[in-house]
Image: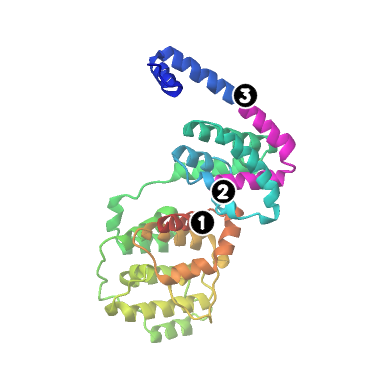
Amino acid sequence: MQLPINLRDIFHLNKKTKEQKLFEERLYREGLEREIEKIIETINLKTIKSKDIATKFILQELDILRRGDIDSQRFVEESGFHLAEYLGASQKFQEDKEKIREVQDIFLSFLDKVYSEKLMFESAKKILNGIMEHWEIGKYSEEGQLFIKDNQNRNSKERPIKSSNLSLDFKKLKKTIMDKLIYLDNQIQKLLDTFSSVPMHIEQEQPRVKNENKESIKDIEPTPKIYNDKRVYELMEEYSLVIEEIITGNITPKNQKDVVEFKKHIVLALEEGNNLASVFYPFLNIDKAIDFPITKMEEKSKKLFVDIIKSFKKRGFSVNLHKYLYDNKEDVYMLASKGDIFMQYLVDFWYEQEEEKV
């Protein structure tokens, strides 16, 4: 009995030697490479009319590719564009929708003809790379190169948190701050580690500063401000037992009074112009009498703020923080697009939160 044509092809395929299969695969790949070069040329020279359209097309494709496999995600991360630029781009640029669709039609039509999913993704990345190279955007631009280099430098400097730091004594940190008054990464990280460790008891012989003490200090030295950075760090030490609850929003009834007192100190510090106190503003429900947008945070404040988010990400945050970030979202994107590494982290943080909801 004669085999049907499709079964005959399958039977013949199974009889092929390994060398024959490799030879046919090589021929297919070589032919595919030539076709990819033709498509890149067509898109760059005949379809895309400006650098602006090329950039918008690439950003939309990166927004889609970032949801792909590890290789696709790596391609996106090494594209020379920041997450703030391509995140949500597939829903943007409505004013150039038709021009972008013209490019996408050619791009997708070609990919549909590639039989292997692996080869399809490889082809897509080669075409996108060819477009970026021709129009000198992304990693082929001066700005993109600087962004990639900055990412590499930051990744090489990252250090894991050591468990031995968890038992750090607050007094040791306070002494370091008082001696040098500088804001180094290891000081801030040690402070955060203490928040993550088992709560320590505050010595009773060191009572909180009362109002009358503040009055006497004011009388003796009226010029210096009460809430300088040293004082804010002292407040972190003094109210260490409730700071974690403030950050997570899980405030226990027994600590409610201390939370109110800490909040009063932060309000007074902000009114006096201390910027470091702004780190705790997003976590507290403070009246609109004091409005402190994220654009007013100084570098040292943003650094501590982002480090707190990194350290408490797995435990969650107060409703106040989520509202604050939502209200300041446009400013965060604006600062991130201008190269602010702390705001870039917040964009990444939002992306992770959105992914977890899906």
- Please tell me how many numbered marks the rendered image carries: 3
**Dot 1: what SS?**
helix
At a point 45% along the width and 40% down the height, the residue shown is 69
Q: Earlier in the sequence, mark 3 or mark 1?
A: 3
At a point 31% along the width and 54% down the height, the residue shown is 165
Q: Residue beneath label 3, please?
A: 34
Segment colored magenta: 34-63
Colour pattern:
rainbow
Q: Residue beneath label 2, please?
A: 82
Spot occupied by residue 243 in the image (x, y as percentages of width and height) = 35, 69
Asked whether the residues under the numbered discs 2 and 1 touch, taking CB atoms below 8 Å apart as contact, a structural biologist would say yes
Q: Residues within 10 Å of mark 3 (few under 14, many from 20)?
A: few
**123 or 268: nearer the viewer:** 123
At a point 30% along the width and 58% down the height, the residue shown is 168
Q: Is residue 229 visible in the rendered structure shown here? A: no
Q: Amino acid at mark 3?
A: Arg
**99 or 86: nearer the viewer:** 99
Q: Nearer the viewer, mark 3 or mark 1?
A: 3
The label on residue 347 is 1
Q: Residues within 10 Å of mark 2 (few under 14, many from 20)?
A: many
